[in-house]
Image: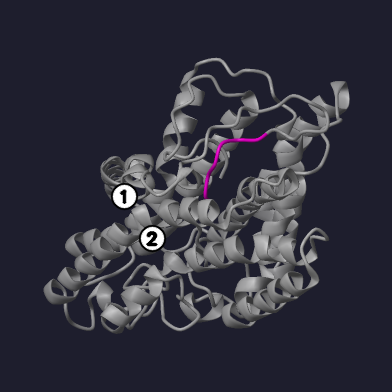
Amino acid sequence: MPSGFSPSDAHVRHGTISSVHLNAIRGAAALVVLLGHTRSLFFSSLSAMGVLSSVGQNLHQSTGSKPGLITMGNEAVIVFFVLSGYLVGGSAIRDLRNGTWSWKRYLTQRLTRLWVVLLPALLFGVAVDHSGLRMFSGTQSIYSGPPGLCIVPCNIADRVSPRVVVGNALFLQNIFVDTAGSNNALWSLANEFWYYLAFPIGLLAVQRRQPVLRRTFYAVLLLGITVLAGKDIFLLFFVWMLGAVLSILPLKIQGDPLRFGTAGFAILFPVAFVLVRRAYLPIYSAEWITAICFSILFYFLLHRTEPARASVYKSTADFFSRISYTLYLVHLPLAVFLCACINTPWRHWDKSPSHLALFLLLNIVLVFFSYAFYLLFEANTDRIRRMLFSRRGPGLNPPHIVQVQAENRTPPVVPEIDVSIGCR
């Protein structure tokens, strides 16, 4: 799931302006998801649509919204998918072009990146949900999924079984099992994982250097993955691939067109981000409008290859970008539990100054807890990779950071990152 530097990569002190801006976008999108979830837990919607940020693979089932309408969180995950396609898909394209492709290295990088945070986050979330179900039982508890609270599923008790947890660890949520516990946000992990597999398989299936029999095998395998994952997951695969296309486009815009284009789409994209939800469009159309608007802005930002100076903006963007994956995976079960602690029997709060202050404090607590969780797990991704695989051959070493290039025909390459977060 962002742009900027993955916490699993070595720290880069002097990034480019484009990497700083993309870090800021990733961090801001993660905060949109967080604030959307916590807002839904405590306050009625601030939008006439009634849903600004709910989660779930099937919107009309997991929210109280009109079926098929896009939400703010859904828009955020579209941004993450485009960034993921650019970074992960672009890396696969380069390796195949250069003849350096390795399934072993690729899968090791992807799975360690996902599992180092996902596995402890799953155990943490299920443990919190078990505690909440024991401590706050009854029809008026948040854990019963009361009417008017669309973000919390009504069957949490059925979602904390070992079968569901293992299914989520294997990226089978919304395919064979529900998302684990109260953490509906885990839906995007399944999307990301199957996109990670499908994209290089598809490239290998059309690569002429491959023997015909092997290409046929890859084509059949791609078809099987598509059928297994299902239509809902693979409809957004094309959005993800839009980012991969950006990775091979030449960067040729200069001068005033670059300045005016960047400024124009920097204004247009937030406006579109708001308007697309109010247009009552079919969700797939709204997702593509969001993806295209962001992709154009993204393309302009990629041209900004000059070094970025140290600033509060850069430091803040780097911080929230680094913790965004962890923040996404752990915040929702903890937010639900804290809501039960201070809001039982559950009801929507009025928007008084005291309630708004408490709401702000709760979000700060969630951010700091996520940072502590990040330091325990995600920050140690490279160390865990070395412990697991350093004795198994050179193909498994963590990737080196690739500096952003300024050449016309070589798009800037931001270091490895996974956009394994999202919410809709």
The answer to whether residue 383 is seen in the rendering is: yes
Residue at the disc numbered 2:
43
The answer to whether residue 281 is seen in the rendering is: no
Judge whether residue 414 is colored magenta: yes
Q: Amino acid at mark 2?
A: Phe
Residues marked 1 and 2 touching at CB (< 8 Å): yes
Label 1, secondary structure: give it.
helix
Residue at the disc numbered 1:
359
Disc 1/disc 2 C-alpha distance (Å): 9 Å
Q: Residues within 10 Å of mark 2 (few under 14, many from 20)?
A: some
> Looking at the rendering, which quadrant does residue 77 occupy?
bottom right
Q: Position of residue 216 (x, y in %)?
A: 75, 75
Q: Position of residue 196 (x, y in %)?
A: 58, 60
Magenta region, residue range: 413-418
Q: Position of residue 204 (x, y in %)?
A: 72, 62
Q: Position of residue 262 (x, y in %)?
A: 76, 32
Judge whether residue 324 is colored magenta: no
Image vertical order of residue 262 relative to residue 275, above or below: above
